[in-house]
Every structure is written in C-alpha cells, then in structure tokens.
Image (cartoon, coloured by chain):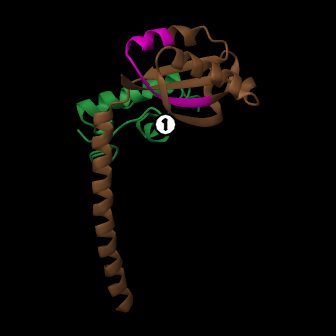
C-alpha cells in the first residue's frame, strides 16, 4: 500500500501551540489523517492526535473546516 | 512540584485592560501554590470557530510550577471566571521535548555539513 509521505517525519515533538505544523496532518475537512497517510509511528501518531485535539479545544484549529 | 502549562483565552473586550483579567488569573494560580515562571502573550487572534458568540480572543500561555493538587482547584476557579472564555491545563512531556531538541540540533549540524559540501559542488560547476 502506498504511503503519501514515505519519509519518517522531521517533526520530533508535536506541540499543540505549533498549529502550522499540525495543519500538515489534517485533510481539507480538518480531519486527522490516518497512519497510512502520515507515515508516523504509533506513538508519534498518538502524540499528533493529542496535540491536534488540544489545538482544536483552544480554537487554533477548526473541528470542521468550511472550505 | 511539577511543570504545567496553562493556556488562557481572554475576552476580546479586555484588550485595552488585560491587567484586570490577567491579574485575576495570576492571583488564582499563585493563591493555590503555583509559581509562574514564564508568560507568553500572543495578543489578539481570530478564533477558528466562534466561542460564546465571539470571533476573537486574547491568547496567553503561562508556564507554571505547582503541586498536583492545585490542578483541580485552578480548573474549578477558572471555570467560574468571567474574563476567561476558554482554558487548557496541560503537562508538557519534558523528556520528549529535550530529546526532540537534541535530534533537531543533530540534524541542523548535519544539514550544515551537507550544505557546505553542496556549495563546493556548485563552485566547481561554475568554474566548468
């Protein structure tokens, strides 16, 4: 199965304040991409989803994008 | 005592008078045994979605040293503070951040090395 990002991420730690980086890992509707697409390890993906959910709570990122 | 991070979204009407709301929050933190080590003010920002009918809010991030029992108390007190429209108390994973920074520095060093090499290549091509 082809991964979109085949390389391992260059982001070593996902911070909820760094929403510009997190934006790369959501699709056009604001949903978090799956591991198949992000190419992250399990623990990195957990870290990512936690960071995105925190960013959403603080309205740094949308729950549903309206584009 | 552990390090916590408290993110607070203030009412946009406080922009002129942030000391009023900010002082209130700082008092809540220090009254419960917390010590503010760093404050990061992002200023007024547009929200990704409206909260309490407002499109803008003032973002302030506090880095706090406080005992674990204080978290629940501060949580309850911030919930009933009118000036605060949204907040988040989180515990940064210091170990992982330190490791990430180490990796970043390593990568930067490597990139610098590589950058020098490619520069040399370019020079050679230029000469040809």
Closest to the observer: B108 or B41? B41
Vertical comparison of B25 with A14: above or below: above
- Which percent across, then down, holds residue B46? 65, 32
- Which percent across, then down, holds residue B93? 33, 30
Does the rendering let one see residue B102? yes
Instruction: Output the letter for the chain in green.
Output: A
Closest to the observer: B122 or B6? B6
Reply yes or no: does residue B68 show up in magenta.
yes
* Chain where mark 1 sits: A
- Quadrant of the image occupied by residue B55: top right
Q: Give the range drawn in magenta.
A: B59-74
- Which percent across, then down, holds residue B88? 49, 21
Reply yes or no: does residue B25 show up in magenta.
no
Q: Quadrant of the N terminus of chain A?
A: top left
Residue tagged by mark 1? A19
Q: In which quarter of the image is the C terminus of chain A?
A: top right
Seen as rendered, the residue at the extreme bottom is: B128
Does the rendering let one see residue A63? no
Chain B tint in image? brown
Q: Is residue B112 left or right of residue B14?
A: left
The residue at the point 35 percent across, 77 percent down is B119
Label 1: element kind: helix
The residue at the point 43 percent across, 13 percent down is B70
């Amino acid at each position: 199965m082809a991964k979109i990002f085949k390389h391992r991420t260059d982001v070593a730690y996902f911070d909820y304040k760094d929403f510009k980086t997190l934006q790369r890992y959501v699709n056009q509707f604001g949903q978090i991409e799956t591991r198949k697409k992000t190419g992250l390890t399990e623990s990195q993906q957990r870290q990512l989803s936690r960071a995105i959910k925190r960013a959403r709570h603080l309205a740094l990122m949308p729950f549903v994008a309206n584009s | 005592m552990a390090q916590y991070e408290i993110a607070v979204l203030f009412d946009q009407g406080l922009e002129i008078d942030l000391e009023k709301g900010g002082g209130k929050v700082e008092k809540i933190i220090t009254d419960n045994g917390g010590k503010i080590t760093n404050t990061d003010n992002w200023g007024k920002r547009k929200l990704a979605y409206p909260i309490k009918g407002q499109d803008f809010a003032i973002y302030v991030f506090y880095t706090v040293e406080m005992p674990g029992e204080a978290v629940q108390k501060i949580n309850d007190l911030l919930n009933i503070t009118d000036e605060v429209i949204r907040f988040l108390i989180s515990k940064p994973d210091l170990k992982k951040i330190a490791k990430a920074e180490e990796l970043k520095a390593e990568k930067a060093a490597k990139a610098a090395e590589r950058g020098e090499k490619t520069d040399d290549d370019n020079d050679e091509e230029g000469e040809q």
